[in-house]
Each structure stands twice: as C-alpha cells, then as structure tokens.
Amino acid sequence: MTRRQGALVALAAVVAAGAWYALRHVTLDSDYSAFLPAGTSETQRALMRELREGLGSRVVLIALGGVPPAALADASRKLAAALEASPAFRYVNNGSGSVGQRELALIGEHRYALSDRLDAADPFSREALRAALEERLAALGSSAGVLDKLLLASDPTADTRRVLARMSPTRSPQRIDGVWFDPEGKRALLVAQTRAFGSDLEGQAGAVHALEQAFAAARSGDAMSLEYSSPGTMAVRSRALIAGDARTLSLVSMAGVLAILAWAYRSAAVVALCVLPAALGLMAGVVLVDAAFGSIHGIALAFGATLLGEAVDYPTYLLTQMREGASAHEVTSRIGRLLGLAVLTTVCGAFALVFSGFPGLAQLGALTVAGVFLAGAATLWVLPHVIPAGWRPRPPPRWSWLSRTPGPSWRPAWRWALVAIATACLVALASQRPWWDDDLAAMSPLPASAKATDAQLRAALGAPDVRYVLTVTGESREDALRRTEALRPALDAAVASRQLGAFDLVTHLVPSEGTQARRRQALPDPQQLRADLEAAAAGLPFRPGVFDPFVAGIARARDAGPVTPETFKDSALGFKVDGLLREDGGHWYVVVPLTEVRDAAGIARALPPDARLIDLRGETSAMMAAYRERGLAFSAIGLILIYAVLAVGLRSPARAAKVLVPILLAAIAAAAILVAFLEPLTVFHYVALLLTIGIGVNYALLMASDVARDRAAMWRTLAVVSGTALTTFGVLAFAHAPVLHAIGVTVAVGVIASLVFSAMLVRPPAEAAA
Amino acid sequence: MTSSRNRALDCAAVAAIAIALAGPALALEAADVLAGLARVERSDATFEETRHIAALTAPVIRRGTLRYVRPAEIEMVVQTPVPERVRVVGATLTIEGRNGVREVRLTDMPAIAGWVESVRATLAGDAPALARHFTVRASGDISRWQLDLTPLSTELAAFVMRVAISGSNAQIERIDVMEASGDRSVMVVTAARGKP
C-alpha cells in the first residue's frame, strides 16, 4: 500500500467510524421549541413556559362542520363521549349541560370554604340571618327564583350563589340542540384537554390520532368535516413538516452539490475526494454537538447537508488550482494561507449563531464551526497526501468562457461609485417597508391557514383575552395563593373604575389555607345557629324546621378538610384550577386571566409589586427585539473577529479592509433586497447575514490573492465554490421552518451580491501592482 | 312578510298535526285550540299568580300585566310583591328586577326554555314548538278548553311535572304549574279590554 492509499484509507476509516458512532450514540431531537426563544428575562421565561407547557398548550379546540346542525349536534355528542373515554384526553366539553351538575354539587359542598361573605365580621349573626331570610323571601316572589328555591333549605345565606357569581362568567358559545355552535350555527364546537403536556410531542401525536379515530367513528357520512387546533397539535404538525423538509431538502441539496462537482471534475474519484473532508467535518460536528448539547436537533442535522455544500469548498480551492507539473503539496503551500483564512472567516461567520440564545441555532453554529474547521484541516493536511502529483482537473465543456471573463475595465473610482449608488438605492427602496418582524408567530413553520383556523376557533369559543396575562409566583402553593388573594382589592378597583372588564382568580376555587381556616372559624356552633335562626325568622312565613339542612351543612363544614386542587379533580373546575395554578421547578405560578383590559398601564400601577402584568403581544415583540439586538451585538463581534483574522492573515489592516468592505456592502445590499422584495428581517436573517459575510469574504480573498493572477483558474474556483453554496442555501430557502428558510434565502442572496460586489471592487493583484 | 310566512308555516303545521291526531269527530283537538290562538296578533292582560311553596306557611301572591306580540315576544310586568319586568324576545330572556338587569340565552337553559315555551308557544298557537318540549292533550270544548302539557325531556321534568293551560276560544284564562318539588302555582289571566 502506498502512502497515498494509506492516507485515503485512514480518512475513509475515520469517516466510517464517525458515522458508526453517530448512528449508535447520537440522540435526535425534534422539538421545534429549540428554535423558539427561551426568554431573556424571568417574565419572558415565565411567558414562554406558559405558552409551551401551560394549560393553553393542552387545550384542543375542535369544530365539526359540513352537514346540518342536527347531525352535527349528534356527532358532537358521540365525539365527546369517545374522547371522554379516551386515555389521551382528560377532559372534554361540548357545551351539553350534564357537566354543570357535577360542578354545582362540588361548589355547593364546599360553599363555606369558598364564600368571601365569611370574611366579613359575624357572617351568621342574628342580623345577618334576618337580612338573608328577607332576601330569600323576596327572591321567592321573583321570576328568577329557580336556583333560590332549590337551595333555600340548605343555603338560605346564598353562599353557593355568591361563589358562582364571582367565578368569571366567560362568554360561552351559543347552543343548538344542547351543544355549542359557532355564531353562524354552521359548526359544532368542542374543547378538550389532552393528558400530555403541549411540549410532549409523542403524547400530543397520540392525542391527535385518538381524536381522528373518534371522529371517524362519530361522523355520519363523508360530508362532515373535522377541524382542530392546539399548540400541541400545531407542534406535531410542525415536526412532521420539518422532518419532511429535512429529508427532501438534504437529498436535493446533496444531489445538486454532487452534480456540480461531477460537472467540474468529471471523475467519481475526485468527487469522492471532495466529499470526504466535508463528510469528516459533518461527522465531527454531529458528535461534538451531541456531546455538548446532549442531543442534536433534526433541523441542525438537516443543516448538516447544507454544511456539506459549504465544506466541499475547501477541497475545491485546492483541486481547481492544480495544474500540470505541480504537486498538491506545492499548491497547498501556495494557497495554504488563503485556505486557512477562508476557514477561519467562515468559522467567525458562524459566531453569531452559536451565541444567538436559541439552543437550535447554537447547534447549527457549533455544527458549522466544527464541520468547516475539520474539512479545512483535512484539505490542508490530508488531501495533499492523496492527490497524485501533476493531476489537474479536466476542463468541463464550455468551461473556457470563464477564462475569457475580463476584469472590470472601468476605473476603480467609477466602480465604487456605482456599487455605492446601487446599495443606497436598494436601502432607499427597503426603507419604504418595515425592516423587522418581531412577531413570535413568524417563527412557526405552519402555513398562515393553520394559524387562521386557530384564531377563528379561539374567537368562536369565546376564550378570554389572550393578550394580557397576570401572573404571581410563590415559594409554595400556600405562598402563591396568599399572594393571589392579595390582588383582589386592586382588581376589584380596576373593575369598578372600568379599567378592566372581569378577572378570574384561582383562589375563588382554592383559597389559601389561612383564608379557609379563618372561614371555618367563622362557622357558628349548631346549637347557637339554631337559636339565632329561630329569632331571625320571627314574623316571616317560613315553615319551622325548613332550614334543618342548613344547620346540618354548617355542622359538616366545621369538620370538613381543606379544599385543595385535588378536590376538583376530573371536573371542569379541576381543569380550570390546573390551568391557573402550576408548580414548576420548586416555584408555584398562578395565572390570572383578564377579560376586556381597557387600561393595562393603570391596572399595572395599582398591583402589588410581586404581581406581573404581561402584555403577551408587547412582551413577545420586546423579546424578539431583544434577541435581534443580541444578534446584532454578536454579529458585530463576529465581524470584528473576521476583520482581525483578515488583518493578521494578510499582514495589513488596509488590505483586510479592501477585502471586507465590498462584502459588507454586499451584506447591506442583500438585507435591503430581502426587505424590499421578500420579507422583513427576523433574528434568523440577522445571524445569517454574518454567515453570509463569513462566506462572501472568501470570494473577495480569492480575488485579491495571487491565485487571481490566473483569471481562468480563479473563475473556475469561484464558479464551483459559489455554485455549491447557491445550490445548498437556495434549496434551504424552500424549507417550511422559518429558521432554515431565513438562513437559506439570506445566504443565497448574499452570495450573489458578494460575488458581484467583490468582482466590481476587489482589485486583482496585477491591477493593484500596476 | 316574515310574520305572514311564519303564519303560513304555522297553519300548515297545525293542519298536519290536525290530520295526524284525527280521532273521534267530536273530541276536542289541541290543534283546534291552537289554530284559534294562532289568529291573535297581540294580546294584553292582567294576571294574579298564587305560588304555593312548601317552605312557606302562606302562599306568595304576585300581580301584574302580561303582553304577547306575535310572533315571539312576551313581556310580564310584576307590580307586587317585588317589582320586576321579564321579557322574552326570540331566544333571549331579560329580567329587570331588584338586582339589576340579567340577560339569559334560553338555549343555555333548557329547563327555563321549556317553561317559557309552554306559555309562549301556546299564545302563538305554535303546535310544533309546543310539541318539541311537551306531549299535549286537549279536553273540554272550544269555549271551555284545557291543554295538559307533560314535559318530554328529563331536564325539564326535573323542574316541571305538568302544566295545565285553560281558556275559552282564543283567550287563555288560567295557567296551573305543578313543579317536581311538589310546589305549584296558579296564574289567573284576565284579558285587558278597551286597550289599543
């Protein structure tokens, strides 16, 4: 075995070992939330947690349509029964009244622990009882006395009614044939809660499956349609889209890159030679990311194929510069510095990715850094041992026109003026439109129609205000509940002054133990109560003994245990409590839904300092802006690093500037083109711009280097290198995942701009010397 | 336009019911009574309701006025003992009383909807609406009739056991409600005369 063969076998063996290790030991992760921000402040983290794991993430909104209401109502009942029985769902409501009875019974049973009437002084004094009895008598003479009469004997002080009245009467949809319908009466509506959290994608996928099976059984004919939406099911759909993308896009992009290489070298062996260092880089990247993050995300892996398109550039620099009579070692010693700079600038270009604050992007960044670095190293130190001396690429057909491409013949000043004017025009064009998109929804891979369905169902079901959420945090459940109870005066005042329409406190259902103990102490001794009741009823036409159930109820309540969230388990109320009170990492979080917020600032001012009023829209926008600024900061640092690498590598700050400035202008022009013609920028575009600079600067470097003295060879190199980059990133632009799309479209546009601008502005060595 | 179409539909429905229920020639049919009521466009009356409630040693007596306007509006104004105004327009029930104004969608409360419909559908002569909530049995003759309504749904039956409405010709004179709790009420209705 020759030394050449040995090196080749060693390289292939390392790649194979890496692939084996990756397949055996690397964990693949597909939760899209890795590409959602974790939040930069405690408020934002609480918000994101709420979005991912809160009650909302488990709620599935369901609509049945397509046939007349009577058939829909029938199917709604069947579907509700099937979901009720399904282990994937823990709660379902289609508006049919049967649910209400259980809830009414629970509230009636615990009325004295829940009623805030007991917080007043002497709630069962003779005077209080007399007033209550007179009120009941009046109610019996009114038209709305149904509940009054029902509860007269057991609850003459109307504590059940009081608790019911305080629970926010959220507007429920209209009923047709006893089940919920949309305002047009065309779709039957249901709400279900999955057993799995929204972030548990396997569980969510199971729930989706169970729902579709239940629908198949409940539907009457093909005309009936099912629509559903929930954060969990949307995540499941996102995952499916991304998985599909990862397969298709990486195959297409790999095929494209291989086609370009085959066209350029027309030799399977040489193509393999190009791919080996890139494959080595990819393996190393995957293993590194898995080691550093515990798993590798599907999106990052899909990006790996794109990275391959970038990493094949380094062997290309070497191979396209091979010529008659020169060994690969001679070529590497000639272009070694250029190659090293190209690798380092691209690594710096991935810098902003690593520190973007998104775990998914950080993986992409780490993958790029490791992959590019290793591919470059393999090209410099392994490939020269493998390529036979004197080998040179056979020029492909119609290759020769490249060698005739003339250098720009205008004077440099004119060229600078032209580029500056073009960039200024693009920026002016872009300034007519919004530059930034800080909407969190811009990060979802789902099509607009899926988001529209969600919004429509939400509105039809009359869900509370989703823009404002009030949260309280406590060290323990009791602490959180006490803090929640303390909010009431401020919120009552806000309702009274019409700053707020309504609010709902979890402590209406689960008061703190302190409050419950005080209320229990306010319950009178049965003997005393009987005497006071008799005195209070004097002169009123109540039959003697009619209130015996009341006295018995008070006696029971004196010995009853405290109300806890478990009290309401498996009822609609339990579902509500679960959504409003949650433990996470040793802390207890309470969410206070607000309806009709008219003056958020006014409400916030009156709240105690430990309560946080979150404006979801404002807060997510602020969060996205914060990430954007962070992206900008790290892009700036990355840019400075690139400049430093260039200045040291080229041994001249001035020469470094001459290479970097055209690419900087190209990046600005690319951003302007995106804004003016395609889409506003997100943090993803931002970090991709630095990547663009890291790649584009390679082209400028090549044009400014000695390699450019042979213009045909230079253009050959550039054609292959930019062709593979354009192919891979261009394919990426078609991804559903906004993160991949943004990176793809930004780099693709940036590569073209970089090529054009550096061709215009970078002076070849001959010209510079002249 | 709409009301005349409703009326045409009502007549058709009444006719259908009449055919379906065609029994011995001399017995009074619910359809005969309802057909007469269906010709009334608007009616005004005073009422006195006596509520016998088990928990009380004396009945509660309520007085006030009743108004019906075709097709689907009824209004009850209670003067004593507790001033109150109850209006049903379409599917919305509004109660203005000592505790302010409350609005209830009848479709949300099947029991109340059934109770309201027993009176309104009778006033409207709307046999299908009545048949949705009750089985209807007629007795007497057209100058001295009685309709006995028995709830169909268990939800309604949990509150109301039986409603008996009696009157003469196109005039309701008395409504007896037997509640499931054992309580009952009797409402005597007197047509207001000389009113526009």
Image: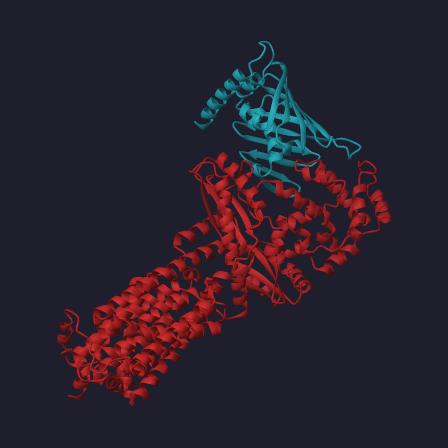
Chain colours: A red, B cyan
Tell me where residue A496 sits by quadrant. Answer: bottom right
Locate residue A377, reporting x and y percent.
34, 81
Q: Nearer the viewer, residue A554 or A372?
A: A372
- Viewer can see residue A409: yes
**Left or right for A33, reference A345:** right
Task: Check the picture and name the quadrant holding the N terminus of chain B.
Answer: top left
- Residue lying at the far bottom of the rendered structure: A651
Task: Check the picture and name the quadrant holding the C terminus of chain B.
Answer: top right
Locate residue B67, reporting x and y percent.
59, 28
Say if A513 sits above or below A320 in the image.
Answer: above
Q: Nearer the viewer, residue A155 or B2?
A: A155
Locate residue A437, reporting x and y percent.
39, 64
Locate residue B6, reporting x and y percent.
47, 26
**Left or right for A85, reference A635:** right
**Left or right for A48, reference A318:** right
Q: Nearer the viewer, residue A499 or A161?
A: A161
Say if B10 sits above or below A134 in the image.
Answer: above
Q: Which residue is at a point 48% across and 74% down the rendered structure image?
A: A292
Q: Which residue is at a point 57% across and 26% down the rendered structure image?
A: B130
- Residue lying at the far front of the rendered structure: A1
Q: What is the count of numbered marks?
A: 0
- Viewer can see residue A182: no
